[in-house]
Image: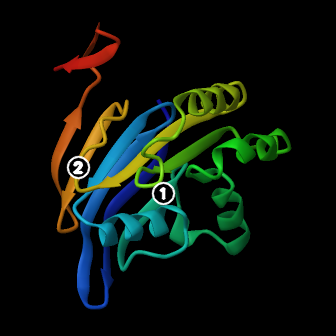
Amino acid sequence: MNELLRFEHVSKTIYNKKVLENLSFSLFNNESLEIVCSNHLEKETLLHLLLLRDQPDNGDIYLNNKALLKMKARERRLAQQQILLIDDHTINSLYNDFLVAPASLKSLLLIYDVSFKIEMEKTAHMMFIKKLKERFQISLLYLSYDQKSHLDSTRTLILKEGRVVKRNSFVNKKYLTNDKKVYKN
């Protein structure tokens, strides 16, 4: 499995407050991960780092095993084409943009801001992902805060005060019961 995204010992301070501290995680192609932040500032800071709108104070962020901070401006712009923020306003308009995407683009990172996606239509979401999977390898990253959103992610990281306090993996066995997935490790 190819690694799409990796945070290595990432720290970020905003207004003299340590928002993220020594955060490390990886996301592989065709995998989904939910990160549950303890507050809105953590989530927004992480989102800005993921969308390449900001840089960490310490640590490195890798996309396709290339350090984003060491990329030249042109390379960063190309890398940004791989990262999409999905909210309830963009899902219906994004697919057409990728019909004309460069042939070199093989994989996509879809970031869902769960605070916006609470009641997004499941059918629209599934159709969108299905169409994109015809052309790209898709990795999903769900960002939420305060509590786990119970989305179908294969792994979950829970942050508190900028640090990972819990890691869950739900990839061993899946059972269907009453049309709901129940995970057992």
Q: Earlier in the sequence, mark 1 or mark 2?
A: 1
Image side of residue 131 versus residue 179, left or right: right
Q: In the picture shown, does residue 89 fall above or below 43?
A: above
Label 2 neighbourhood size at 10 Å, few (<14), some (14-19), many (20+)?
Answer: few
Residue 46 horizontal/vertical position (percent): 39, 65
Q: In the picture shown, does residue 123 fall above or below 5?
A: above
Residue at figure coordinates x 55%, y 73% from the top left: 53
Q: In the picture shown, does residue 175 fall above or below 111?
A: above
Residue that mark 1 sits on: 62
Q: Quadrant of residue 52?
A: bottom right
Q: Amino acid at mark 1?
A: Tyr
Residue at figure coordinates x 34%, y 30% from the top left: 154
Residue 61 horizontal/vertical position (percent): 44, 62
Residue at figure coordinates x 48%, y 69% from the top left: 48
Nearer the observer, 145 or 4: 145
Residue 59 horizontal/vertical position (percent): 35, 69
Residue 53: which disc? Answer: none
Image side of residue 47 versus residue 135, left or right: left
Residue at figure coordinates x 72%, y 46% from the top left: 94
Nearer the observer, 119 or 48: 119
Residue that mark 2 sits on: 147
Q: Considering the numbered disc 2 on the image, is that residue within a helix, a strand or a loop? A: loop
Q: Amino acid at mark 2?
A: Gln
1 or 2: mark nearer the eye: 2
Q: Quadrant of residue 60?
A: bottom left
| Mark 1–mark 2 distance (CA, rounded to whole Å) | 27 Å
Residue 76 horizontal/vertical position (percent): 65, 66
Q: Considering the numbered disc 1 on the image, is that residue within a helix, a strand or a loop? A: strand
